[in-house]
Image (cartoon, rainbow, N blue to C red):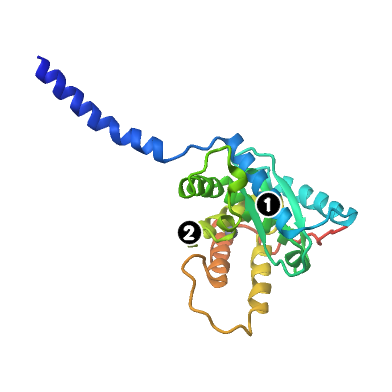
Amino acid sequence: MLKSAFRIARVLSWLFLPALVFAQSSPQLSTADEIRAGDALFAAFQKSQGFADTPESKAIEAYLQKVGDKVAHNAKRKLPYKFHLDPHPGYHSAVGYPGGQIVVGGGILALMRHEDELAVVLGHEIEHIDLMQCAQRVIDAMQKDHLTAEQFDKLSLDDFGNPYGKAGELAADREGVKLAVAAGYSPQAAVELMEVFQFLSRNAKPAPPRTDSPSLEERIQQVRNQIKSEGWDASKTEKPLDLP
Ligand SMILES: [Zn+2]
C-alpha cells in the first residue's frame, strides 16, 4: 500500500514537474503589464529621437489618432491605442510597441497621397500588437535579460525594431488590410504604397533575399490574392491624405 502510494506520488511529481519548470521559466504578461512595457518603450523611443512636441506635430498626431481609432475599431483586443509622429523626414517606416503605442515616421507620411495608405500602415502596426507578437517579444526579452515586470525601463528598443519574421509580417499585412477595409478604406492602397517603395529601391544593388521578412513582391502578391479571394473592390475611390 505504502509502496504503491509512493509510486503514485512519483508519477504525479513526474507529471507536474515539467509544468512547474515551464511556469517558472516562462513569464506571464498581463494586459496591464504589456501596456506599461509599451509606455516604457515609447518613452525610451522619444528620448532617443529627441523629437519636440510642436503645435504642428500635435495637429498631425490628432489626425493619426482619428484614422487609427477607425482602423483599430475591429481589432480583437480592446487597447488604448496611441498614435504618435516622429517627424524625421528620413524615417520611412512605422513601429508598434506593446500595449498600443504606435509611431509613424515623417518620411513615410511624405510618400503617401491617400488616407487609405495611412490606414493600411496603421492596420499593419495594430496587428503586430493585436496578434500578440509585441507581447511575445516582451516575454522573450524578460527571459533573455532576466527582467521582472518592475524593470520595463530596462527593455531594449533594439529588440522591438526588427521584423517579426516572414510569417509574422505577412500576417500583420493580411489582418491589417482587413482592418483598413472594414473601416471603409481601399485595399488597393496597400499595393500602391508598396509599389512606391519598389520604385524608390529600383537602383539599389540587388541584395540576397532576407529570411526574416518578406520581399515587397511577396507582400504585394499577398494583397492582390486577398483582394481576389475576399471579393474586395480594388477600384474604390481613395480619400486624399488630409494632413493639417
Ligand atoms: Zn511589420
* Amino acid type of the residue that numbered disc 2 sits on in the rendered structure: Ala
**Could you say which disc has been placed on residue 44 in the image?**
1
Q: Nearer the viewer, residue 201 or 98?
A: 98
Q: Residue at x 57, y 84 (%)?
A: 205
- Label 2: which secondary element: helix
Q: Picture coordinates of residue 236 (x, y %)?
A: 72, 60
Q: Picture coordinates of residue 130 (x, y %)?
A: 58, 45
Q: Residue at x 39, y 35 (%)?
A: 23
Around disc 1, counting alpha carbons within 10 Å, would you say few (fewer than 14), some (14 to 19), or many (20 or more)?
A: some
**Could you say which disc has been placed on residue 67 in the image?**
none
Q: Residue at x 59, y 40 (%)?
A: 34
The image quarter in which residue 149 lies = top right
Left or right? Give the position of 212 relative to 108: left
Q: Work out how far the residue at label 1 is from the one at label 2, CA to CA, in angstroms.
A: 28 Å
Q: Picture coordinates of residue 165 (x, y %)?
A: 49, 60
The image quarter in which residue 104 lies = bottom right
Q: Is 84 located above or below residue 224 in the figure? A: above
* Amino acid type of the residue that numbered disc 1 sits on in the rendered structure: Ala
Toward the right, the furthest residue is 55
Q: Mark 2 and mark 1 in contact (Cβ < 8 Å)?
A: no
**Label 2: which residue?**
167
- Label 1: which secondary element: helix
Callout 1: CB less than 8 Å from ligand 1:
no
Q: Picture coordinates of residue 227 (x, y %)?
A: 59, 61
Q: Residue at x 63, y 85 (%)?
A: 203
Q: Which tag is nearer the camera, tag 1 or tag 2?
A: 1
Left or right? Give the position of 54 relative to 11: right
Residue 185 visible in the current orientation = no
- The quarter of the picture where the N terminus appears is top left
Q: Nearer the viewer, residue 64 or 40?
A: 40
Q: Nearer the viewer, residue 240 or 228?
A: 240
Around disc 2, counting alpha carbons within 10 Å, would you say few (fewer than 14), some (14 to 19), or many (20 or more)?
A: few
